[in-house]
Image (cartoon, helix red, strand yellow):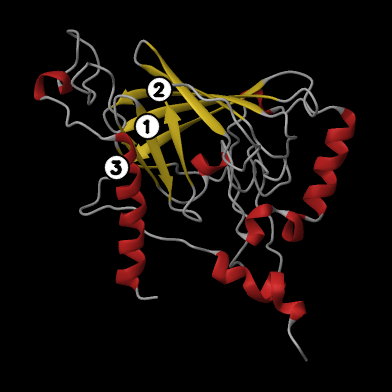
Amino acid sequence: MTDRSRALAGVVVVAMLAALVWTAAPSSEAQSGAQTGAPRIPRMPDGKPNFTGLWQYIGTANWDIQDHAAAPGPFHQLGAIGAIPAGQGIVEGNEIPYTPAALAKKKENNAKRWELDPEVKCFMPGVPRATYMPFPLQIVQGNRTIGIAYEYATANRVINLVTHQKSQVDSWMGTSNGSWQGDTLVVDVTGFNDLTWFDRAGNHHSEALHVVERYTFRNADVIDYEATIEDPKVFTRPWTIRLPLYRRLEPNAQLLEFKCVEFTEELIYGHLKRK
Protein backbone atom coordinates (compact mmCIF):
# COMPACT_ATOMS: atom_id res chain seq x y z
CA MET A 1 0.00 0.00 0.00
CA THR A 2 1.37 3.43 -0.96
CA ASP A 3 1.76 6.34 1.49
CA ARG A 4 -0.99 8.18 -0.37
CA SER A 5 -3.43 5.29 -0.10
CA ARG A 6 -2.65 4.88 3.61
CA ALA A 7 -3.42 8.55 4.19
CA LEU A 8 -6.65 8.29 2.21
CA ALA A 9 -7.71 5.26 4.23
CA GLY A 10 -7.37 7.29 7.42
CA VAL A 11 -9.50 10.02 5.88
CA VAL A 12 -12.16 7.45 5.00
CA VAL A 13 -12.44 6.31 8.65
CA VAL A 14 -12.94 9.90 9.82
CA ALA A 15 -15.48 10.53 7.04
CA MET A 16 -17.48 7.47 8.10
CA LEU A 17 -17.63 8.74 11.68
CA ALA A 18 -18.57 12.21 10.48
CA ALA A 19 -21.49 10.72 8.58
CA LEU A 20 -22.66 9.12 11.81
CA VAL A 21 -22.49 12.19 14.01
CA TRP A 22 -23.13 15.18 11.65
CA THR A 23 -20.94 17.98 12.91
CA ALA A 24 -22.26 21.53 12.73
CA ALA A 25 -19.73 24.34 12.44
CA PRO A 26 -19.57 26.47 15.59
CA SER A 27 -20.66 30.06 15.26
CA SER A 28 -18.15 32.86 15.84
CA GLU A 29 -20.23 34.06 18.77
CA ALA A 30 -20.14 30.64 20.40
CA GLN A 31 -16.38 30.34 19.87
CA SER A 32 -15.66 33.52 21.77
CA GLY A 33 -16.76 32.08 25.14
CA ALA A 34 -20.16 32.07 26.79
CA GLN A 35 -19.19 34.34 29.68
CA THR A 36 -16.83 37.25 30.21
CA GLY A 37 -13.53 35.94 31.50
CA ALA A 38 -14.28 32.35 30.50
CA PRO A 39 -11.61 30.45 28.54
CA ARG A 40 -11.90 31.08 24.81
CA ILE A 41 -12.78 27.58 23.66
CA PRO A 42 -14.57 26.35 20.52
CA ARG A 43 -18.28 25.79 21.02
CA MET A 44 -21.17 24.23 19.16
CA PRO A 45 -24.14 26.43 18.10
CA ASP A 46 -25.99 25.30 21.25
CA GLY A 47 -23.11 26.57 23.41
CA LYS A 48 -21.65 23.16 24.32
CA PRO A 49 -17.85 22.82 24.03
CA ASN A 50 -16.82 21.51 20.61
CA PHE A 51 -14.04 18.90 20.91
CA THR A 52 -13.84 18.30 17.16
CA GLY A 53 -10.21 18.09 16.08
CA LEU A 54 -7.06 15.99 15.89
CA TRP A 55 -5.56 15.34 19.33
CA GLN A 56 -2.58 13.49 20.81
CA TYR A 57 -1.05 12.71 24.19
CA ILE A 58 2.68 13.30 24.61
CA GLY A 59 4.25 10.98 27.16
CA THR A 60 5.26 7.42 28.02
CA ALA A 61 2.06 6.07 29.59
CA ASN A 62 1.69 3.38 26.95
CA TRP A 63 4.91 1.85 28.30
CA ASP A 64 3.76 2.07 31.93
CA ILE A 65 0.98 4.19 33.45
CA GLN A 66 2.98 4.42 36.69
CA ASP A 67 6.33 6.10 37.32
CA HIS A 68 9.09 4.06 35.70
CA ALA A 69 12.80 4.20 34.98
CA ALA A 70 14.43 3.71 31.60
CA ALA A 71 15.06 0.07 30.71
CA PRO A 72 16.48 -1.96 27.82
CA GLY A 73 14.31 -3.26 25.03
CA PRO A 74 13.68 -6.93 24.23
CA PHE A 75 16.67 -7.38 21.87
CA HIS A 76 20.21 -6.39 22.90
CA GLN A 77 21.21 -6.52 19.22
CA LEU A 78 19.22 -3.32 18.64
CA GLY A 79 21.09 -1.35 21.29
CA ALA A 80 19.20 1.79 22.29
CA ILE A 81 16.56 1.31 19.60
CA GLY A 82 13.46 -0.07 21.28
CA ALA A 83 14.64 0.83 24.78
CA ILE A 84 11.98 1.90 27.28
CA PRO A 85 12.10 5.65 28.05
CA ALA A 86 11.77 6.83 31.65
CA GLY A 87 8.43 8.44 32.45
CA GLN A 88 6.22 9.99 35.06
CA GLY A 89 3.00 8.11 35.65
CA ILE A 90 -0.54 9.28 34.97
CA VAL A 91 -2.09 7.41 37.93
CA GLU A 92 -3.33 9.63 40.74
CA GLY A 93 -1.05 8.92 43.72
CA ASN A 94 0.99 6.54 41.52
CA GLU A 95 -0.77 3.56 43.15
CA ILE A 96 -2.96 0.93 41.48
CA PRO A 97 -5.00 -0.81 44.21
CA TYR A 98 -4.75 -4.43 43.05
CA THR A 99 -6.07 -7.35 45.05
CA PRO A 100 -3.19 -9.72 46.01
CA ALA A 101 -4.15 -12.24 43.29
CA ALA A 102 -4.48 -9.52 40.63
CA LEU A 103 -1.10 -8.05 41.60
CA ALA A 104 0.50 -11.46 41.13
CA LYS A 105 -1.13 -11.63 37.70
CA LYS A 106 0.22 -8.19 36.84
CA LYS A 107 3.75 -9.32 37.73
CA GLU A 108 3.33 -12.42 35.58
CA ASN A 109 2.09 -10.27 32.68
CA ASN A 110 5.08 -7.96 33.07
CA ALA A 111 7.54 -10.84 32.98
CA LYS A 112 6.00 -12.07 29.70
CA ARG A 113 5.02 -8.66 28.30
CA TRP A 114 6.92 -9.03 25.01
CA GLU A 115 4.75 -12.06 24.30
CA LEU A 116 1.42 -11.40 26.05
CA ASP A 117 0.74 -7.67 25.56
CA PRO A 118 -2.32 -7.46 23.23
CA GLU A 119 -0.54 -4.66 21.34
CA VAL A 120 2.01 -7.23 20.13
CA LYS A 121 -0.75 -8.92 18.10
CA CYS A 122 -2.45 -5.68 17.00
CA PHE A 123 -5.59 -6.27 19.07
CA MET A 124 -7.90 -3.31 19.74
CA PRO A 125 -6.39 -1.15 22.54
CA GLY A 126 -9.52 -0.65 24.67
CA VAL A 127 -10.44 2.33 26.83
CA PRO A 128 -8.64 4.26 28.23
CA ARG A 129 -5.43 2.91 26.62
CA ALA A 130 -6.44 4.06 23.13
CA THR A 131 -6.26 7.65 24.41
CA TYR A 132 -2.59 7.63 25.40
CA MET A 133 -1.01 5.36 22.82
CA PRO A 134 1.64 7.17 20.71
CA PHE A 135 -0.84 7.80 17.90
CA PRO A 136 -3.28 10.69 17.30
CA LEU A 137 -7.04 10.44 17.61
CA GLN A 138 -9.74 12.33 15.70
CA ILE A 139 -12.88 13.59 17.46
CA VAL A 140 -15.93 14.39 15.31
CA GLN A 141 -18.73 15.96 17.37
CA GLY A 142 -22.42 16.23 16.64
CA ASN A 143 -25.44 17.14 18.75
CA ARG A 144 -26.57 13.56 19.39
CA THR A 145 -23.36 11.53 19.13
CA ILE A 146 -19.59 12.00 19.16
CA GLY A 147 -17.29 9.81 17.09
CA ILE A 148 -13.67 9.08 17.98
CA ALA A 149 -11.33 7.50 15.42
CA TYR A 150 -7.94 6.27 16.63
CA GLU A 151 -5.01 5.94 14.25
CA TYR A 152 -3.84 2.73 15.94
CA ALA A 153 -5.40 -0.32 14.26
CA THR A 154 -8.26 1.83 12.89
CA ALA A 155 -9.99 1.53 16.29
CA ASN A 156 -13.07 3.71 16.73
CA ARG A 157 -16.15 4.22 18.88
CA VAL A 158 -19.31 6.32 19.07
CA ILE A 159 -20.39 8.15 22.24
CA ASN A 160 -24.18 8.28 22.55
CA LEU A 161 -25.27 11.64 23.97
CA VAL A 162 -29.06 11.41 23.63
CA THR A 163 -30.15 7.80 23.24
CA HIS A 164 -28.03 5.85 25.72
CA GLN A 165 -27.42 2.21 24.89
CA LYS A 166 -26.79 -0.93 26.90
CA SER A 167 -23.95 -3.15 25.77
CA GLN A 168 -25.36 -6.22 24.04
CA VAL A 169 -22.06 -8.10 24.02
CA ASP A 170 -18.63 -7.60 25.58
CA SER A 171 -16.19 -5.90 23.22
CA TRP A 172 -12.69 -4.44 23.01
CA MET A 173 -13.78 -0.78 23.05
CA GLY A 174 -16.92 -1.12 25.19
CA THR A 175 -20.18 0.83 24.89
CA SER A 176 -19.96 4.60 25.51
CA ASN A 177 -22.76 6.87 26.77
CA GLY A 178 -22.11 10.57 27.29
CA SER A 179 -23.63 13.47 29.20
CA TRP A 180 -22.69 17.05 30.07
CA GLN A 181 -21.75 18.44 33.47
CA GLY A 182 -21.37 22.12 32.67
CA ASP A 183 -18.51 22.34 30.15
CA THR A 184 -17.25 18.83 30.95
CA LEU A 185 -18.12 15.86 28.74
CA VAL A 186 -18.65 12.80 30.95
CA VAL A 187 -18.53 9.40 29.22
CA ASP A 188 -19.65 6.20 30.95
CA VAL A 189 -18.08 3.13 29.32
CA THR A 190 -19.09 -0.48 30.07
CA GLY A 191 -19.39 -3.79 28.23
CA PHE A 192 -15.69 -4.65 27.96
CA ASN A 193 -14.05 -8.00 27.41
CA ASP A 194 -11.04 -8.92 29.57
CA LEU A 195 -8.51 -9.05 26.72
CA THR A 196 -6.98 -5.55 26.83
CA TRP A 197 -4.22 -4.14 29.03
CA PHE A 198 -3.74 -0.59 30.30
CA ASP A 199 -0.09 -0.49 29.12
CA ARG A 200 2.91 -2.57 28.09
CA ALA A 201 3.82 -3.16 31.75
CA GLY A 202 1.04 -5.73 32.19
CA ASN A 203 -1.55 -3.68 34.09
CA HIS A 204 -4.82 -5.46 33.44
CA HIS A 205 -8.54 -5.75 34.23
CA SER A 206 -11.47 -8.17 33.99
CA GLU A 207 -14.71 -8.08 32.00
CA ALA A 208 -16.25 -6.18 34.95
CA LEU A 209 -14.27 -3.05 34.01
CA HIS A 210 -16.20 0.22 34.29
CA VAL A 211 -14.58 3.46 33.06
CA VAL A 212 -15.89 7.00 33.52
CA GLU A 213 -14.07 9.52 31.33
CA ARG A 214 -14.12 13.30 31.70
CA TYR A 215 -13.08 15.69 28.88
CA THR A 216 -12.61 19.36 29.85
CA PHE A 217 -10.96 22.16 27.86
CA ARG A 218 -8.01 23.79 29.61
CA ASN A 219 -7.81 26.15 26.66
CA ALA A 220 -8.69 25.93 22.97
CA ASP A 221 -5.75 23.62 22.21
CA VAL A 222 -5.52 21.44 25.34
CA ILE A 223 -8.06 18.97 26.74
CA ASP A 224 -7.69 17.77 30.32
CA TYR A 225 -8.57 14.07 30.17
CA GLU A 226 -9.49 12.06 33.26
CA ALA A 227 -10.63 8.45 33.59
CA THR A 228 -11.84 6.77 36.77
CA ILE A 229 -11.43 3.00 36.68
CA GLU A 230 -13.49 0.52 38.67
CA ASP A 231 -13.29 -3.29 38.59
CA PRO A 232 -14.21 -5.14 41.81
CA LYS A 233 -12.72 -8.37 40.47
CA VAL A 234 -9.25 -6.84 40.15
CA PHE A 235 -9.04 -3.67 42.28
CA THR A 236 -9.93 -2.95 45.90
CA ARG A 237 -11.26 0.54 45.07
CA PRO A 238 -11.74 2.88 42.10
CA TRP A 239 -8.65 4.77 40.89
CA THR A 240 -8.03 7.62 38.45
CA ILE A 241 -5.66 8.60 35.66
CA ARG A 242 -5.15 12.16 34.37
CA LEU A 243 -3.34 13.50 31.30
CA PRO A 244 -3.47 16.34 28.75
CA LEU A 245 -4.42 15.89 25.10
CA TYR A 246 -2.84 18.41 22.73
CA ARG A 247 -4.37 19.66 19.50
CA ARG A 248 -2.23 18.85 16.45
CA LEU A 249 -1.55 22.24 14.90
CA GLU A 250 0.86 21.51 12.06
CA PRO A 251 -0.39 22.40 8.55
CA ASN A 252 -2.57 19.72 6.97
CA ALA A 253 -2.54 17.59 10.12
CA GLN A 254 -4.73 14.54 9.54
CA LEU A 255 -5.40 11.06 10.81
CA LEU A 256 -3.34 8.58 8.82
CA GLU A 257 -3.45 4.79 8.81
CA PHE A 258 -1.74 2.25 11.06
CA LYS A 259 -3.32 -1.09 10.15
CA CYS A 260 -0.91 -3.31 12.02
CA VAL A 261 -2.56 -6.68 11.39
CA GLU A 262 -0.37 -7.22 8.34
CA PHE A 263 2.71 -6.67 10.53
CA THR A 264 1.73 -9.51 12.88
CA GLU A 265 0.77 -12.23 10.41
CA GLU A 266 4.13 -14.00 10.54
CA LEU A 267 4.14 -13.84 14.35
CA ILE A 268 0.63 -15.24 14.71
CA TYR A 269 0.38 -17.60 11.76
CA GLY A 270 3.99 -18.31 10.78
CA HIS A 271 4.03 -21.67 12.57
CA LEU A 272 1.20 -22.88 10.32
CA LYS A 273 3.29 -22.60 7.15
CA ARG A 274 4.25 -25.79 5.36
CA LYS A 275 7.92 -26.58 5.65
Q: Of label 2 and label 3, which has the lower sequence position?
A: 3
Q: Quadrant of residue 140?
A: top left
Q: Quadrant of the N terminus?
A: bottom left
Q: Residues within 10 Å of mark 2 (few under 14, many from 20)?
A: many
Residue 94: x, y in percent?
67, 28
Q: Residue furthest bottom?
A: 275
Is residue 225 rendered to the left or right of residue 70?
Answer: left
- Name the residue that disc number 1 marks: 146
Work out whether residue 185 or residue 64 is closer to the camera in this orientation and state it: 185
Helix, strand or loop for disc 1: strand
Residue at 41% in and 48% down: 136
Residue 79 visible in the current orientation: no
Lower position in the chain sequence, tag 1 or tag 2: 1
Are circles 1 and 2 on residues that touch, CB within 8 Å? yes
Asked whether 182 or 221 is in front, the reply is: 182
Q: Which mark is residue 19?
A: 3
- Residue 272's place in the image compared with 220, above or below, is below
Amino acid type for the residue under numbered disc 2: Leu
